[in-house]
Image: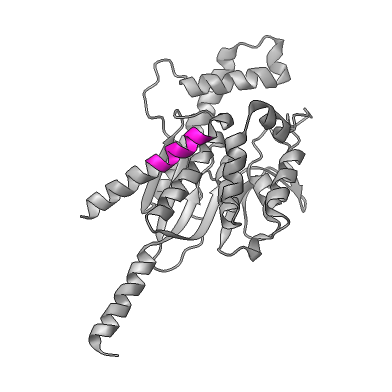
């Protein structure tokens, strides 16, 4: 092989590796549907996703992507109605939850079967929070459906998942955007989709429209709220929780800066806007397209 052939071979390897992506998908409830559009935009631009890590809805979308079930997920999302969401949530109040999550686990198993994380075609990890030890836990092996179910367990809404003496709730409690969790390889790009990014617009009264919508959701479904507790208390609690999650993601970005970051602002869609899936998917695609265009412009 002459020098020219050697250089060409090196150039080809560099080009391939520079298009390899370690993808991180953050939590954000229904906003997580934006991950679907973002993934489609990445692939349309020739990027190769070689590993995935996610939290909560990011764990769900990422897990189904790695399992090759994105089209199934899009079909379900497209058909979602409020009644179907209630069935999937399986509302059955208990001492520590409003929904058992059993129906959700059943649905996940119907889609992905009993596939194990270690048998997936590319490295996958998702984050949950163990409320007994008080520590985050990263699932890198075990049943995929059960790991996703643990990662999406919104505290006080879904029943916590018990596995091996641990009690897991939503991974966003510790790590909403798990940039430090995804598997990396030499030459790849760290790409993140933050579905809980800071609000796009200033709030006039400290409670954006999406916060008011989400607080009204809790007012309808949490029994204690029917006792006459003012909605202002709920709005304040939800707003503070939102700010905490936003700060969580910004801290993660400072500690592990991604090469490409697509932000989905919290005030773009509500946590429970699952019936707006098509709109959210399109928004995620648009945001990633814009992010990639800006990155290309800066490089040139």
Residue 59 seen anywhere in this rendered image of the structure: no
The furthest residue to the top: 228
Q: Quadrant of the N terminus?
A: bottom left
Residue 289 sits in quarter: top left
Horizontal placement of 92 versus 30: left or right? right
Residue at screen point 46% across, 44% down? 37
Q: In the picture, which quadrant includes the C terminus?
A: bottom left
Q: How is the image coloured?
A: one colour
Number of on-image labels: 0
Placement of 235 over or under 86, stated as above or below: above
Tell me which residue sits at (43%, 43%) in the image: 251
Give percent across and percent down for residue 151.
63, 45
Against 50, is 177 above or below?
A: above
Q: What main secondary structure does the magenta stretch of the protein show?
A: helix
263 vs 213, left or right, is left
Is 213 part of what is drawn in magenta? no
Image coordinates of residue 235 in percent, x first then y, are 54, 19
Q: In this rendering, does residue 240 appear at all?
A: yes
Residue 206 placement (x, y as % from top left): 44, 19
Q: Residue at x 48, y 33 (%)?
A: 279
Front in this rendered view, residue 64 or 153:
64
Image x and y of residue 44, in percent? 40, 53
* Residue furthest to the bottom: 1
Q: Is residue 41 above or below residue 274?
A: below
Magenta-colored span: 278-286
Residue drawn at (72%, 50%), measured in percent from left and top?
Answer: 109
């Amino acid at each position: 092989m002459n020098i020219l052939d050697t250089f060409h071979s090196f150039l080809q390897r560099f080009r391939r590796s520079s298009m390899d992506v370690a993808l991180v998908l953050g939590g954000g409830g229904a906003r997580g549907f934006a991950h679907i559009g973002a993934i489609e935009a990445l692939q349309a631009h020739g990027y190769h996703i070689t590993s995935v890590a996610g939290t909560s809805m990011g764990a769900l979308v990422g897990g189904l992507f790695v399992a090759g079930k994105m089209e199934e997920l899009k079909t379900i999302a497209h058909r979602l109605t409020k009644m179907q969401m209630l069935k999937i949530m399986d509302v059955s109040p208990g001492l520590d939850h409003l929904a058992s999550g059993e129906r959700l686990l059943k649905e996940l198993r119907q889609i992905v079967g009993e596939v194990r994380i270690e048998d997936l075609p590319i490295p996958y990890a998702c984050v949950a929070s163990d409320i007994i030890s008080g520590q985050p836990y990263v699932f890198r092996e075990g049943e995929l459906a059960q790991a996703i179910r643990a990662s999406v367990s919104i505290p006080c809404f879904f029943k916590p998942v018990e596995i091996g003496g641990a009690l897991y709730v939503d991974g966003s409690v510790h790590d909403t955007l798990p940039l430090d969790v995804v598997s990396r390889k030499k030459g790849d790009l760290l790409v993140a989709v933050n579905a809980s990014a800071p609000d796009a617009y200033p709030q006039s009264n400290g409670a954006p429209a999406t916060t008011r919508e989400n607080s009204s959701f809790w007012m309808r479904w949490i029994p204690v709220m029917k006792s006459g507790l003012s909605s202002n208390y709920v709005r304040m609690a939800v707003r503070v929780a939102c700010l905490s999650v936003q700060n969580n993601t910004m801290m993660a970005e400072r500690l592990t800066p991604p090469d490409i970051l697509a932000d989905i602002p919290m005030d773009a869609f509500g946590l429970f806007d699952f019936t707006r899936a098509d709109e959210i998917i399109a928004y995620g695609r648009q945001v990633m397209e814009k992010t990639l265009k800006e990155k290309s412009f800066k490089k040139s």
